Image: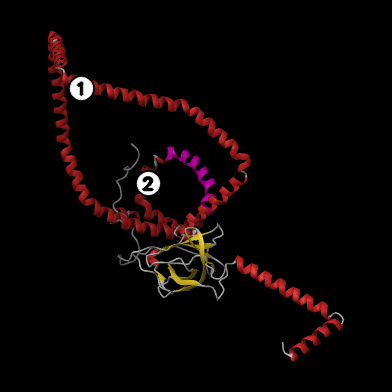
Amino acid sequence: MTPLKASAFRRAWQRLRTVPGLGRDVLALVGLAVVGVTAAVLILSQMNYLPPWSDKTVFDIEFDEAVAVSPGNGQQVRIAGVPVGVITDSQPTDRNTSRVTVAIDRGHPVYDNARAVLRPVNPLNQMYISLDPGSPPGRPLPEGGVVPVTQTSRPIQPEEVLNHLDERSRLALTALLAESDTALASSAKTLPAGLKATQQSLADLRPVMQQLADRREHLRQFVTALSQIATAAGDKDERLTSLVNSTQETLAVIGKRDNELRQTLSELPGLSADLRQAMSSTSTLTTQLNPTLDNLDAAAADLPGALSRLADTTEQVHDTVVAAAPVVAKARPLVDNLRPAVTDLRGTFDGFAPVTRWADNATAQITPWMYDLGAFVYNTSGIFNVSDAQGGLARAQLSLNLQSPTGIETPEDMTTNTYRHAESPIGPYPAPGEGGPR
């Protein structure tokens, strides 16, 4: 230490001792600095911090997606489950992939056939890289080399699975998870009872399963016995001979029943005749069905045109109904008001029924004189009406015959039924007495 530095140190020390409170403050600052450095060292050690002077091998690993990778937060690189390095950086590439930079301790050679898997440490999606460094015949990976994406894999996130579902399926799955959470929340109370009921059900099913096992054993024994029988029958001719003899005896017994068989066959002709008659009736029915089917075929040929015309008619009826809808709506109150009157008229028409049967005869008697009766009513009204639009007026009737030189009708003209003997504008008149009830 030079004399100048020693003198400065003595002055500083003297000042610390003589100035009140300065030594205490400096001591507090020094203690605070020591605590801060200690805390920083502990935090960085827990985060697997990589100091610049560390001796590490740095290379890149390419993933199709770096899920939950957080460089600088101490996410580990493990070989056979042993931490050997950390993730230091993560960048996207122009191929829509992610390139993750890792630094591992030297002494762990990595080859170009290495494989890497991105795995979660816990359900919070904290990741680490599980590295298989590879081996010969692969070549050693150089500093700054890249493990390609074809040699890596990553975990599939739950939202990626849900994104492939439609909205209804996602909502249903969400509701299922929520209901499962609710059910499991009360499982301490409800699940033991359910497990006990399941245990009882299994106990009840035990006899059934035992019976099924016995049945399986019996089937096995049966198949074994059949195999033994077949083997024995194939090996020994005596048993085959016995089987043939039994068959012969059976045929002999059937031969003794010839009479009964012959009687049964004798009843078959009657059955055959009935069948022949039934087939003849069926043939007649088929003959009658042929014209019907021909007519149906002809009708089927005309049916498309008729249906097309019916469609046009239906459209017109639809237009008519639409146009008549306002009228029907307005006429409904009128119909409601007329309903009591129609009810009263029904009884009136019942009273008119005996009279209406004479209406044809009365009409036949009145029709020839309708024009003269109309003229009579009109002239009579004109004669006896002593007023018009201009007020009171005396009236008289004068009949003129334009075909007579004198213009006066003769007594013969006044008694002639002109309309009966001439042409009627409503057609010929019925003969007198015609049209009445018989």
Secondary element at image label 1: helix
Q: Which residues are magenta?
A: 333-355
Whether residue 344 appears in magenta in the rendering, the answer is yes
Looking at the picture, tell me which residue is in the foreground, 44 or 375: 44
Task: Judge the density around disc 2: few (<14), some (14-19), many (≥20) Cα neighbours within 10 Å.
Answer: some
Looking at the picture, tell me which residue is in the foreground, 418 or 205: 205
* Residue 35, placed above or below residue 162: below
Q: Quadrant of the C terminus?
A: top left
Residue that numbered label 2 is attached to: 363
Secondary element at image label 2: helix
Looking at the picture, tell me which residue is in the foreground, 82 or 199: 82
Instruction: Name which residue lies at 32% across and 25% down.
Output: 220
Calculate the distance from the C-alpha at mark 1 to the C-alpha at mark 2.
113 Å
Residue that numbered label 1 is attached to: 231
Looking at the picture, tell me which residue is in the foreground, 190 or 421: 190
x then y, percent, for residue 260: 15, 10
Question: Of the residues under marks 1 and 2, which one precedes in the sequence?
Answer: 1
Amino acid type, callout 1: Thr
In the picture provided, is 308 more to the left or to the right than 75? left
x then y, percent, for residue 36: 70, 72
Amino acid type, callout 2: Thr
x then y, percent, for residue 198: 53, 34
